[in-house]
Amino acid sequence: MENTEIVKRLSYLVKSYERITKVIAQTRQTGLAYGILVEDADDDVDLILKGNGKEVGLLTVKGRLSREIEKELPQWDVWERWLKYVPGIGPAIGAKLILMFNYRSVAVCKDCGGMLEKEDKQLICQECGKTAKDGLLKYRIERRDYATISKWWAYMGRHTVDGIMPKRKSGELANWSTEGRTLGFHIGDQFNRQKESNPYKALLLEHKAKHQRNHPEWSKGHVHNAAKNEVVKIFLAHFWTISRMLEGKEVSEPYAGAIMGHTNIIKPPFWEESDTTYETQGRYASHSAVEMRA
């Protein structure tokens, strides 16, 4: 998938979807605050959110964007051959994952194509000196490549320091993607909503039970968050492995298997490739590789 115009369109659709989702949440909260909406009531009663026969509501716009995203996704093999079969991973989450894994949008000068860098809270073109506030901002699509699972985990904010995911510090730039970490939280929430027959939900429950046994001093929230974070890390390892396999790229064994000798590798569910593919190319996440304290 190298057609940058298609990538730009998908990026536009995903960003628009995220913005309308945020507006819907804000509108719902405002409605609740003023007593226009009732907690846990159907949003259909509100014309701003739902619309009517003549006027389009915000939820209708969100649904349209989701359908447009879904129309673009078949152009990526990882969606067609795996992601779309994973319960909880809808078009919006799938598209966001594909974009974050494969591409980055680089801000460049609309006038001369020069690189933009932030100076005194403004984006300044390094070639012509003009600022982005003059309407000179556009994006160039570049490819990404995460050669190892650990690099992918780190970018998505799923790496650990002394067993704990690092947090942002005031006044410091994070060396990981805050969008990626937020996306991981959404994925974890989606898996938590699934039935126990979903392998990722089953893994979540398994990790919760393990933490309850091993850490009786932990609160329920602590146990739940640790288990959810670990399952997200496993899913991201599956995504990394399958994406690279489909592109014919080298797939290395994760740290737990290659360095520490652990063998309880978790194969990705809903992936119908042969066991030969697993043994010769695929190296997936192990329980040991993803354990964290919170």
Image: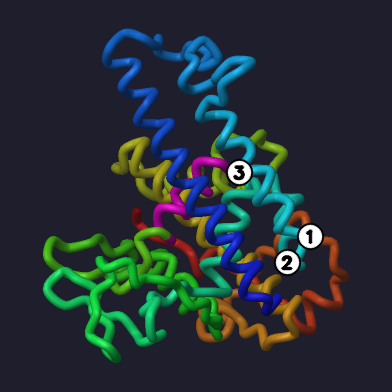
Relative horizontal placement of residue 113, taking residue 286 as reference (left or right): left
Q: Residue extending furthest bottom?
A: 127
Image coordinates for residue 284, horizontal then vertical, percent: 64, 71
Point out the image quarter for the N terminus. bottom right
| Residue identified by numbered label 3 | 65
| Residue at the spot 52% in from the left edge and 77% down from the top edge | 141
Q: Nearer the viewer, residue 147 or 278?
A: 147
Relative horizontal placement of residue 216, taking residue 201 as reference (left or right): left
Decide whether residue 227 is among the magenta residues. Answer: no
**Residue 239 position by quadrant:** bottom right
Residue count near mark 1 (Cα–Cα under 10 Å), binned few <14, some 14–19, many ≥20: few
> At label 3, which amino acid type do we have?
Leu
Q: Which mark is residue 76?
A: 2
Q: Which residues are magenta?
A: 180-191
Q: Is residue 163 above or below residue 293?
A: below
Element type where label 2 sits in the image:
loop
Would you say the residues marked 2 and 3 are in contact, meaning their CB atoms lie under 8 Å apart?
no
Could you give the CA–CA distance between mark 2 and mark 1, rounded to whole angstroms? 7 Å
Q: Earlier in the sequence, mark 2 or mark 3?
A: 3
Image coordinates for residue 75, horizontal then vertical, percent: 75, 65
| Residue at the spot 49% in from the left edge and 49% down from the top edge | 16
Q: Nearer the viewer, residue 60 or 178?
A: 60
| Residue identified by numbered label 1 | 80
| Residue at the spot 65% in from the left edge and 51% down from the top edge | 69
Q: Nearer the viewer, residue 259 or 224?
A: 224
Residue count near mark 2 (Cα–Cα under 10 Å), binned few <14, some 14–19, many ≥20: some
Image coordinates for residue 20, horizontal then vertical, percent: 46, 40
Element type where label 3 sits in the image:
helix
| Residue at the spot 48% in from the left edge and 44% down from the top edge | 208
